[in-house]
Image: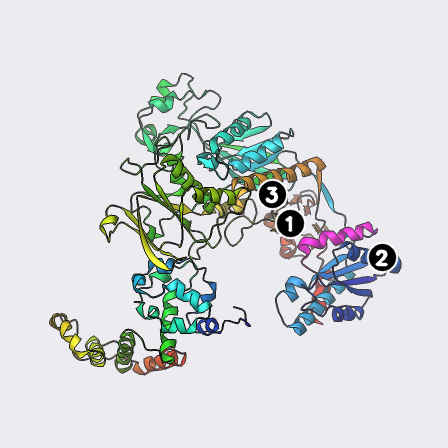
Amino acid sequence: MEPKIGVYVCHCGSNIAGTVDVEQVAEYARSLPAVEIARDYKFMCSDPGQDLIKNDIREFGINRVVVASCSPQMHEPTFRHVLQESGLNPYFFEMANIREHCSWVTEDREKATEKAKALVSAAVRRVYYHQALEANEVPINPNTLIVGGGIAGIQAALEIADSEHKVYLVERDPSIGGHMIQLDKTFPTLDCSACILTPKMSLVGAHPYIELMTYSEVEEVSGFIGNFKVKIRKKARYVDEDKCNGCGVCQEKCPWTADSEFDVGLAKRKAIYTPFAQAVPNIPVIDKEHCAYFLKGKCRACEKFCERDAINFEQVDQFVEIEVGNIILTTGYKLFDPTPLTQYGYGRLDNVLTSLEFERLVNAVGPTNGKISLKDGTEPKSVAIIHCVGSRDANYHEYCSRVCCMYSMKFAHLVSEHIPEATVYEFYIDIRSAGKGFEEFYNRVLKEGTTFFRGRPGEVTNVAETPEEKGKLVVQFEDTLVGRQRRIPVDMVILSCGLEPQQDAEEVARLFSVSRSADGFFLEKHPKLDPVATMTDGVFVAGCCQSPKDIPDTVAQASAAAARVLALISKGKVEIEAATAVIDEEKCSGCRICNLLCPYSAISFVEDKKVSRVNEALCKGCGTCVAACPSSAITQKHFTAEQIMAELEGILV
Amino acid sequence: MRKNSPQSFLKEVASIPGSNKISECIQCGVCSGSCATATHWEYPPRKIIAMVRADMRDDVLSSNSIWFCVSCYLCTAHCPRDIRPANIMHALESLALKEGYKPPTHSPAMYQSLVGSIKRNGRVHEFGFMFKYYLKTNPLAAIKMLPLAIDLLIHGRMPLMPKKVKGKDEIKAILAKVTAGGAQ
């Protein structure tokens, strides 16, 4: 069938037409070989735009389509679908990106139009050689892996497991719960964090469809959407999970202690420990670094007192291999460490706390049983809360961490509740209380008499300049609404630290083949229209690993990720790209270079024929083998030499 | 900044090298909060930036504020937007001199003696430059400095004769270029 090409130049409102002379580009396209028709239209992706193509296919027998518009990322599937609906093979389509590559990168109308013409010419020449391809279908394994057992992971796991599909929930700490279980109350409703979270944690622990793997980490991931293979390291607990009944006698008897991670160093825990009383699972681990037996070869007190014989010092790390169809990353965040901001004195001055330290301090089951106290045990009479520590700061993190304004005001409320006569000062730059019930909470804190100073403090010091400042922490700042520098003496300073990516976000991103945005958080597929998926099909993100967010937003995103996974499970199969590599067995010399290079292990060697062969279900069409083959025996469908040469020619003429 | 911004004073200040980020200021006030001398300023540094943006040319250039910056650069170290307030204050000082505003301090004499010393010797000659400074301002005030000067002389910390550096001409050229860039 002789190619009859239709070219459609999109205005994208004024996004393209504002810079590129779209009519001129369409006019030019008409002069290109095999082009039957060329049009320009306001929005090609709209229904009328799509109908334009459909009509031309019907009326003029167009059998190849070029759309000159935006990046194929979003709308290549849209237009391929148009062809399919009109009875054409969807691969008879090519997109020329004249928005990101032309109109958005220059204000020079002439040059943008010239480049748009070149890209259209390339697409036209390429589409001429396109071949009909059939997309491959692969089944979806209905099991799901969720990495990270904070509120995001818990929510997603429960939603999927409640539909009776298996979930593997992997958590690297000894218990699930994440940061949320460390918090005292939650803004703006002041629900007790543990009270709303522990029921969900026990559900996870007892759920017949959730296999909970705590104190475990993902080591290796291979495969692709619907068919991932994952290797998980179960770190040695030195406690037999089947025998232990969580009685806790081992923790009572253990004579060695270490700083409690759960209480951010404000309290001690034993060398054998569960991080907190409501831990799920309620099975302790032995911290080798602090255990007398591991350090000195003597003690074994826990073993002596354990009635169930559950202690096992011989335990080693175990590796478990599982197969899953989808993966949700819910690996959370790390609190910004304010030590580098030496002007605020964290780590140098007593009674300068991070926000998480204050959460533990004010928590009823925290190290002080909820008593807000200074290092000397007395109650503070005045508390300063400094916003935006590590956030909105080009020296640390440029982004706003979104939760600090609200939790800072929650702190003000908690201080007033615990110590009614105490004065609380909030040092803010802007109050960001955009959320349901947030502004109302701001009003409530104002009514309670909290003093708000607009100004980022320059310094927190213990060097007194007046008798009133003696023995106090002094916050020096400009009250910017008055325009005066002031010094306010207080007893306690809370630094409202921002949220930052986990320390190993880079390695985790590499492990799961997801990208990170400039701020270091995992990159979603589309910032507005697909904030849950990633560039890697079958890998989803939820919670603070994607960006700083509060609990309601985290739960919403986790539920969304679960819904996306359930949709794939319910469909049962997924179409994968037809642009795979094929080996011409006549030309293959059997050198096996491609076997070793393939990052997806998709090429195997056929012993009796002495040639290599590509497994199309595994091939992702990356093209590595094509480039490496010394005999030019490998062709990548949809990227044949003929097609690429034609495209180059189109750009150069 | 928008090319067609109506704030002509802001545009003028932003075009001075080192002050180009002034429009990115979020008025957090950490500069004024960190400033060692801000309590003496008519308007603290944050407000000076706000006033530049509000086109309050005369109020800014005639205020004592810009002259009280002692170049400790704490504001610049703490600034979350990399605005470099100290640079802006010096740019404004320069502008005020050019426009004939009378500074409330001896800072210009100090700067001029210092730069003059560098021009002559290629480096700062402390004795020469202080001598010049006191001659220009208040010779009697120099008497108070005498004990310190003697101490420094005895310990060889303040040679009477200047040491000159190699490449004096290059330094002169650098200074000429800086001056051509708008500094005084």
At label 2, the amino acid type is: Asn
Q: Earlier in the sequence, mark 1 or mark 3?
A: 1
The answer to whether residue A486 is seen in the rendering is yes
Query: Which residue is the site of mark 3?
Result: A539
| The N terminus of chain A, quarter of image | bottom right
Q: Residue at x 41, y 37 (%)?
A: A414
| Mark count | 3
**Image check: A123 left or right of A362?**
right
Q: Earlier in the sequence, mark 2 or mark 3?
A: 2
Per the model, the C-alpha gap separating discs 2 and 3 is 38 Å
For residue B131, the mark is none
**Image check: A265 left or right of B127?**
right
Q: Residue at x 70, y 50 (%)?
A: A580
Mark 1 burial class by Cα count in 10 Å: few <14, some 14-19, many 20+: few
At label 1, the amino acid type is: Leu
Query: Which residue is the site of mark 2?
Result: A55
Name the chain under label 2. A
CB within 8 Å, label 1 to label 2: no
Query: Which residue is the site of mark 1?
Result: A529
Name the foreground residue: A259 vs A441. A441
Residue A76 lies in the magenta stretch: yes
User: Residue A621: x percent and y percent?
Assistant: 66, 51
The segment highlighted magenta reads A70-86
The answer to whether residue B159 is seen in the rendering is no
Q: Residue at x 76, y 64 (%)?
A: A124
Q: Residue at x 72, y 37 (%)?
A: A571
Q: Dividing the picture into quarters, in which one does residue B40 lie?
A: bottom left
Residue B75 lies in the magenta stretch: no
Kind of element beneath mark 1: loop
| The C terminus of chain A, quarter of image | bottom right
